[in-house]
Amino acid sequence: MRVCQGNVEPGFEPVAQLFERLFRVAGRGGGSFVLRHRDRVLVDIWGGVADPATGAGWWRDTLALSFSTTKGVAATVIHRLADRGLLGYDDPVAAFWPEFAAGGKDRITVRQLLRHQAGLDRLAPIAPDADALLDHRAAEQRLAAQAPDHRPGSSAYHAITFGWLCAGLARAITGKGMAELVRTELAEPLGVDGLHIGRPDPDSQRVAATIGELRPMPDLLARFVALPFPITLPHRRIAEAMLSPGVNEVFRPPCPPVLDTEMPSANGLFTAESLATLYGALANGGAVNGRRLLTGGTVHDLARPPRSRVPDLALGFPMYWRLGYHQAFVPGVRMPTAFGHYGYAGSGAWADPATGLSAAFVSNRVYPLSNAMGDLALVRLSRLCVRTFRALQRPGALSA
C-alpha cells in the first residue's frame, strides 16, 4: 500500500519518493511536509500512522506535537505586536512588564529576550517539578522575579523558558495568553487552522499520538551534567536549560500532559501546511496568499543575519540567532538568508527571503538523541527540494 498522499508539482516527484521511503520504515509513525514558492504550493504530502493503538492514518490536517518549532511561532506573535507599535525591540522588557525589573533585569531589552540573551535559561528554578511545568502563569511570574543565571547579553539557548518569557511579555501588553494570541494574531489573519499552543480541544481527534520514548534525551543530558568542568560546560548548560524533575512525566507518550498547558517553547501542535504558510509570509515581505501578516520593514529587520559568530553558551556552537529564529541549517545547499526554527523529534520550518521559498515538516515519531534534532527527515527533504527548485529554475518555469 502506498504511504505518501498529496500532490507535488512536476519535477518534484523525487521528494514524494523520498518521503515514501522514509515513512515505509516499520514504527515510523506519520508526518507531513510542505514546500511553497511565494503563493504557489510545490509540495504538499503526508502519510503514515497517526495513532498505532487505533491504526488511524495521518491526514493533511493532523496536528503533531512540534517541540522547539513552537519558539518561532511564539516569536512571530511578538513581531505582530512590534509591527503595530506596541513595543520596540530595543525597549526594556520591564517597560511593558514592570515585574520583570526584579533581580536586576530592568535593562534587558526585547531584542535580547528574542536572541536568548536574557540570562534566564535554567529551567529548575522556574519549574522545579511536574506541577510547576504545567502551570504557565506561575512560570511567567517566577521568570519576572528571577535574577539572571548569567550576565545578560550573551546568548544561551533558553530551551523551555523562552516561550514563557515571550508569553509574559505579550500578556503584559495585551492581557491575553499565548494560546489565544497565536489564534488571533497568526492563525486567523493567515486563514489557517493548524497553529495551536497546546491542544485546541480536549476531545480533538486531529492530534497525533506521540510515538517513541523521550527518556533517552534527558538521561543522556544528565550524564553530561555529571562530567567535569570546563570541558562539558555547553553540555552542562543545555542540560540545565532542559531538565527539571517532572520533565519525563509531562512529555510522556502517547498523550503527554504537556498538551493541556501553554508551554510556548515546546508544546505547539501544528500542521505542516499552516507552518509553511506562516513562514511563507516571512519569506515574502510579510504577505502570503493575499493576506498581510507583517509589514515589509519588520520582516526585513527580523530576518537580517546577525554579525556575531560567538558560540551559544548552551549549545557550544554559533546559532546565528535572529529575533526568535535561527539560521536554517540544510547541509549540502547554501541558503545564507534562510531562517526558521527546528524542533526535537525532527519538526521544523524555514523561510528564505532570497528565493521566496518556505518549508515545514511535522511528525509524531521521537527517536533517541543521536543528533540535535533526533530525526533528519526535514533536512533531507529540504535539501532535495532546494536542489530540485534550483535545477528547475529557468525563465517562467516556476513563476508565481
Image (tube, grey):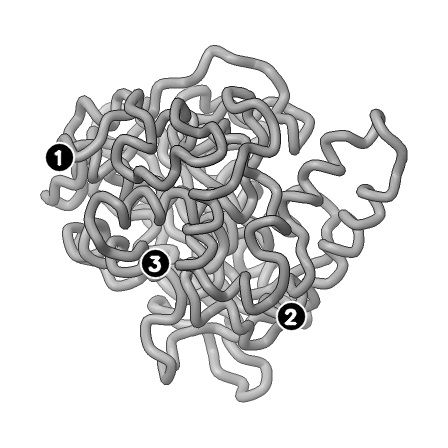
Image location of residue 271, percent across then percent down: 37, 60
Of pointers 3 and 2, the one earlier in the residue sequence: 3
Image location of residue 394, percent across then percent down: 30, 25
Of pointers 3 and 1, the one earlier in the residue sequence: 3
Q: Is residue 295 left or right of residue 54?
A: left
To which residue does mark 3 refer? 7
Q: Residue at x 38, y 75 (%)?
A: 206
Q: Please, is residue 360 above or below residue 57 in the view? A: above
Which residue of the protein is positioned furthest toward the bottom in this rendering? Answer: 54
Label 3 environment density (alpha carbons within 10 Å; few <14, some 14–19, many ≥20): some
Image location of residue 302, percent across then percent down: 32, 26
Q: CA distance from mark 2 to mark 1?
A: 39 Å
Mark nearest the camera among 3 and 1 is 1
Q: Residue at x 48, y 73 (%)?
A: 208
Q: Is residue 99 left or right of residue 249?
A: left
What's the amino acid at mark 2? Glu
Q: Residue at x 28, y 21 (%)?
A: 301
Of pointers 2 and 1, the one earlier in the residue sequence: 1
To which residue does mark 2 refer? 249
What's the amino acid at mark 3? Asn
